Image (spheres, coloured by chain):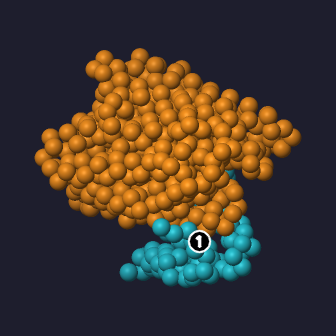
Chain colours: A cyan, B orange
Amino acid sequence: MNQYLPYILCLILFLIGLYAVLVKKNLIKIIIGLGIIDYSLNLFLVLVGYKKQSIFPILSKDTQIQPMVDPLPQALVLTAIVIGLAVTMLMVAIAIRLYEKYGTFDITQIRKLKG
Amino acid sequence: MNNIIPLFVILPLAGAFLNSLLGRFSKLFSDILSNIVCILTTFFSFVILFNLNLSPNNILTYRVGGWVAPIGIMLVVDHLSVLMLLTVNLVALCCCIYSISYMEKYTDKWKYYALFMLMLAGMNGVIITGDIFNMYVFLEIAAIASYALVAFGCESEELEASFKYLVLGSVASAIILLSIALIYSYVSSLNLADISLTLSNMVDVNKVYFIKFISLLLIVGFGVKSALVPFHSWLPDAHQSAPAPISAMSSGVLIKTLGIYAMVRILFNIFGVGQKILSIIVILGLLSMFVGVILALYQWDYKRLLAYHSISQFGYIILGIGLATPLGILGGLFHLMNHSVFKSLLFLTSGATEYTLGTRDLRKMGELNKKMPLTTFSALIGSMSISGVPPFNGFWSKLIIIVACIQAKQYFAGFIATIVSFLTLSSFTKVLKYGFYGKSEVDHKNIKEVPGAMVVPMIILSLCCIFMGLLLLPHIRQYFLDNVVNVLQQGTIYATKVFELR
């Protein structure tokens, strides 16, 4: 049971984010929800490469060869964080513009498009 | 010859960089630079097509940085990629020429061109890459550029549509990333061909369930990106609000590349799709077809109507591919090409009428056939192609799909496809009557035909609509379309072919 706990934490984080995106009416809360979804996935990616009692994957001349964690998911997480940053920036910029146009962050009042 | 493959990403990326660096000093510079980039990428996709038939196994590969396949990133081009490359770059070229005049009314044209080039780089990247995480990165590049482009006008509707698109698109990307993480944890590889080989050699009782679960996750993720029916709600808003060339790009090629191409590549060539997943795809296709066309019938906004028709025509493509018979796949992929051409043509005509009249409401248009003969002609050709009137290209692909349905004994699907075709025809009769030929209630005395830079792409695309049916002639078909069908038919043989060449 104990070894599954981090994965359950990931799932809980993912569901919290999804809840915020689906239920909350405030633009900023939706953006935060998407951020939480991103973080839960990054955590999951790191956990995929994690091994118990192993070292960081850098080999220099004087270190002994020991079991190490998988470095590839860490590289992937770095890329995913950068992409998440770009998306969050764009979303915040659009939310600010929306506030200028409508004077509110409430999505129930931002609905000019219909049909 | 393999060395020109990375140019499909490098050229647009360089274009984006130079545009954002130097574009602010001269409008002419960014116009010329962007068009040259699009012309070059279109030219190179034809070069690749002619070289592909000469190469062994009909596949070209390129190792990025010289690393050997499962370790480094590999770029792979086969006939399916070439079909997508040709459509994407041709439509991008037309939209780029069109933007020269159309985007004059917006400020900061160079920012538009920089984002446009980024979107093109992302789409070409998705098509040529042979690495699943690389595919995700390019997919996000194209998607982020398109979110920004939808909001480009910064009016309230555009911002609202863009935010909606952003939220749904990000959730879809999260689901795709989750499935990539799961694939990596199971297979320990990110190379598409390597994943396929490892999966087929693996002995594990849970393998079948794993593949089913991942396939469903991917169908949801790419389904949102390609706006299949339960996930379609962002598409009408986004395509209605974006500038016309961007609507043409995203409806014509973006949702196909990010959605269908990526989904089909992974499901057919990597996992080797099973019967249950195929029937889910067929059901999604039928739903999209029917719901899309029914919603389109009510619309009076020209671009919104076209956007709903995109959903419905998408259903045809998915239905054809989901049948998984050679004829069905041929029809689906041919319809994919045709739809890119005629839907971008129609969106460009909607941009032309908006440019002169300042409205998209069909009831305020009318009597344009005398004043804007070329735009009306293009709209007529596009409408007849999309509603499947012979001899235009839409007729042939729809005919093939319906015949394939009947051959596969899916009579109900064939029936729905025929009905939807009639409904599409009736919807476009409305467009032509109210929008272009009928009497107008508003005075249209002072309008004239749009500038030449907007007419030329519409004429090019109309000619494509008229002559693309010729691709089905036996000799030409053998050279191009049959090879594309083979790529999907052979399924996981893709992996062995790639590894022989690495």
Q: Nearer the viewer, residue B412 or B486?
A: B412
Q: Nearer the viewer, residue B403 or A63?
A: B403
Which residue is painted at 37% across and 33% down in the image?
Answer: B393
Please give left or right for residue B40 compared with residue B191 in the image: right
Q: Nearer the viewer, residue B148 or B354?
A: B354
Which residue is painted at 70% across and 38% down in the image?
Answer: B100
Which residue of the protein is positioned furthest toward the left in this rendering?
A: B409
Q: Whole-percent x and y of residue A81?
A: 63, 62
Please give left or right for residue B418 compared with residue A81 in the image: left
Which residue is painted at 68% across and 35% down in the image?
Answer: B451
Q: Whole-percent x and y of residue B392?
A: 37, 32
For mark 1, name the chain: A
Where is B275 relative to A114, above or below? above
Q: Which part of the image, by quadrant, shows the N terminus of chain B?
A: top right
Q: Nearer the viewer, residue B433 or B66?
A: B433
Label 1 amino acid? Lys
Q: Whole-percent x and y of residue B122?
A: 58, 45
Where is B60 relative to B185, above or below? above
Where is B238 relative to B116, above or below? below
Q: Whole-percent x and y of residue B305?
A: 46, 55
The residue pinned by badge 1 equals A112
Q: How many marks?
A: 1
Q: Is residue B393 visible?
A: yes
